[in-house]
Every structure is written in C-alpha cells, then in structure tokens.
Image (cartoon, rainbow, N blue to C red):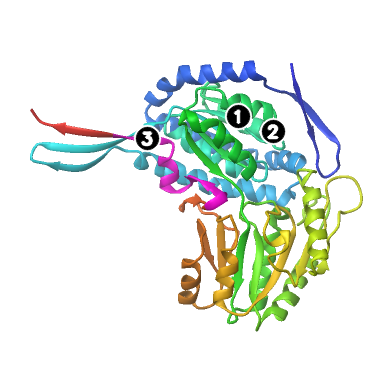
Amino acid sequence: MPQLTIHNPATGAVITQVPADDATSVAAKARAARAVQAAWAAQPIAERRACIVHFRASIVEQLDALAAVMTAETGKPIAMSRNELNGLLGRLDFFLDQSAAAVATETVFDDAGMREQIEHIPLGVVANISAWNYPWFVGCNVIVPALLTGNTVLYKPSEYATLTGLEIGRLLHEAGVPREVFSVLVGGGDVGAALLEQPIDGLFFTGSHATGQRIAQALGPRLVKLQLELGGKDPTYVCDDADPRLAAASLADGAMYNTGQSCCSVERIYVHEKIHDAFVEAFMDTVRGFAVGDPTREDTYIGAITRAPQLDVFDAQVADAKAKGATLRCGGERLPGPGNGYAPTVFTNVDHTMDLMREETFGPLIGIQKVADDDEAVRLMNDTRYGLTAGVFTPDEGRARTVLAQVHAGSVYWNCCDRVSPRLPWSGVGDSGVGLTLSTYGIQTFTRPKAWHLRKA
C-alpha cells in the first residue's frame, strides 16, 4: 500500500506516515459514493442537518487537539489555528440555518391553472480538491453545504493538510455521515488526477491558477460542473484623508496574517503621496512588533511557510525588486535554523515592472507604492490578471464606493481587509477563478435547478 509522509514545516521533522490512495482505491470510493447518493438525498434534510450539528459539537469539544494537528502539519501559529476553528463555527451555523430554505422548491407563478416551480436537485457525486492554508474553512465551504443538499462527497485534502482532512472525515463519520457518503482521498497530485477520471457530477477546487487550468482542460470536454477558487494579487488603496496609523495597523495584519498564506491577503498597497511617508513609518512599526518563530508558542504571529518550494518564489521576488530599484525596509531573507522560515519583508519605491507587484506571492512579503491620486490608484489596482479582493481606506464612503466600483474584484472592502463572511458570496474574476462558495448562492451551487410546468387538467 502506498504511504504519504507528513512533515512539520517548522522543524523539517517527519510527523508520521499515513496510508495513501491509488487509482484503484479512488475508483472504488467513487463507485461507493455513486451507489449511496440517491438514498442520502432521499433522507429528510433534517436528518442530514442533525449530522452536521453533531459534527459542530465535536469540533467545539476537541478544538485544542484539532488546532494542534493543523499547526503541526501546516506551520500555522497555534493561536491562528484556534481562530480558524472558532471562526468555522459561525459558518457552520449559517449553513445549518439557511440550507433548507435555500433549496426549498419555489413557486414562481400560479395563475389560470398554470403553476411554475423551481426544484433544487443535488448535483450527485461532488469531488472536492481542497487547500492547505485554511483547511477547515476552505474544506467545509464545500463539504458541509454539499452534504446538506444531498450530495455525496469525494474529498481530497491537500497533501500538506492531510491529517486535518482525516480529522474532518473522522468527525463527520462519528456524527453519522456514512463512509460511502463522505470519503477522504489521501495523496498528492496522482490521487487528484485519478479523481478527475471518475464519473463525478461536480468538481470544486481551491489552489493555484496553474493547477486550476489543468483541471479545466481535463474536465472541459466532459461538461462537468466546475468551480475554481484560485489565486489573487489583492490591492488596497490608502487615500490622503485616511488615518495612516489605523490603516497601517489593519493592512500589516492583512498582509502578514497566517504568514501571508491566504488567497485574500493584501499583496499590494498603494498610498496617496500626501500621507505615504507617515503610513510607511506606522506600517514598519507594526511589522517590527510581529513575533516570529515557533508556531506552537502562543505569542507567535509569523509561523512557518507550509510549502518549502515557495521560499524560492520569495527569494526570486526579493532579488527582482532589489535589481529594479526597490528599497528593502526589512526582511528579505530566509530565517536561520530548521524549517521553512522567512522574515517579514517590506519594500517601498516599488512599481509594476517588479514581480512583487504583479505575481502572487503567498507569503509575508509586501510592496508599498506611492500614487498621486485616485485615478492612478484605480489604474494600478486593475493592472493585474487577478480579481479576488480589493480595498480602500478613507473616512468618505462615497469616495470609497466610487473607487471600488471601478475595480475588477469579486469582493471589495471599505476600511477593512482580508475578511470573509458566510453571508456574502466568495468569488473572483479573471485568473482568480470561476464559480462561488458561501452565501445562499454558495448553498444552491451544489444543486441544479429543475423547472416544473404544471397545468391542471
């Protein structure tokens, strides 16, 4: 039987080895999921909901142990691991509260003997290839509404968050979800490729643009429902009337939280020239206060980089920015010792000739660029192939709305950043992907509408 080796990115040590799937076991799990899907969908939604209620309760009871597992295999600071699990509870509550109504049959016309209705039918067998940076958030954005709406799920966690994926499976099975209804597939890219070969009804992927492209090319000829949550190069503009210290504190956190390993991390900052210097000074004060090191320590803010190859990306962006005239304010290097450590890194005097301002970084690196006015800020914010999030800091809501209305992004922020709400759809434009999760739209996305035309005889 193949084995997957799990490493601790903060130390480089091997945590454990776990049995992995192969093409044969993936196909067997897909067949089993297909065989039980109709029966799972036929259950009253109240019974499926009861499983998720139990699942939620187990997370609360075991939260500290689950956080420790996540920190060990991803390098996420332990306080942030607990934050993710605590934050997940509100998302679960939203799905529990809203799913029944979101997929209830709708009567949209009833007159003169003709009635028209929309029924929401489960897609069937849903495949989910998930991410490592927020494995509970990202996984459950798909898993929970998919199960509640009557689908069976083939879930492949990232190989960098496998133990967390197995914990999700354990808790769901203990909560009453049959193993055939929810299956965990363990492995790397070969297991993901085997999953794409199965007769699935929907594929939900979170990860890089390059992998998303390959998935789209593989599934396109089969016309399988496809949702791709991909990367971003998320900008924020600080206007001249903003408080530079308040904006700097918020944006430093938005850029560096989870060691910068978030799709919606702030990756580009544009500051009006009138307050640029004051903003940079305040930003540097905040970044210098971030505790760096052992992610198991309660006070650690900057933990480990989960994927070692990403360190090469950082090094290349730093070298490119230096070569093109940027000013390095702090960091710019790997941390000494074992594990995947990288110092919080800030550049000023940047421009769009630099990869740091154009290509996704996914780490604790940020460029701050001076702009002359709102028009220049909008032009630079839109100078990207991505379109996930964008933000503006100003006390003037009208000004913020005017700027953000011109920016191509799925989510926009006024005086905040790096924020996700279960009540709002999570989507992107351009190379940030297609489809959406969260909100009632993100519940309905796991169904297909069936139109009923009903005439009395």
What percent of the width, then of the height, locates residue 15? 81, 33
Tag 1 residue: 169
CB contact under 8 Å: marks 3 and 1: no
Instruction: Please report whichever mark, 3 or 2, sits nearer to the chain's N-terminal start.
Output: 2
What percent of the width, then of the height, locates residue 11? 86, 42
Asked whether, in this view, residue 448 is left or right of residue 405, the answer is left
Q: Residue at x 58, y 79 (%)?
A: 373
Amino acid type at mark 2: Thr
Amino acid type at mark 3: Arg
In this view, the mark in front (3 or 2): 3
Tag 2 residue: 162
Depth order, front residue of 181/328: 328
Q: In which quarter of the image is residue 328?
A: bottom right
User: Callout 3 environment at 10 Å: few (<14), some (14 to 19), or many (20+)?
Assistant: some
* Numbered disc 3: secondary structure: strand
In this view, the mark in front (3 or 1): 3
Depth order, front residue of 7/128: 128
Instruction: Please report whichever mark, 1 or 2, sits nearer to the chain's N-terminal start.
Output: 2
Q: Could you tell me which quadrant the N terminus lies in?
A: top right
Instruction: Please report whichever mark, 3 or 1, sits nearer to the chain's N-terminal start.
Output: 1
Q: How far apart are marks 3 and 1 (CA)?
A: 26 Å
What percent of the width, then of the height, locates residue 445? 43, 40
Question: What span is in magenta?
Answer: 430-450
Asked whether, in this view, residue 323 is left or right of residue 228, the answer is right
Q: Is residue 441 located in the magenta-colored stretch of the structure?
A: yes
Relative height, residue 390 to residue 2 (above, below):
below
Tag 3 residue: 448
Amino acid type at mark 1: Gly
Q: Is residue 280 located in the magenta-colored stretch of the structure?
A: no
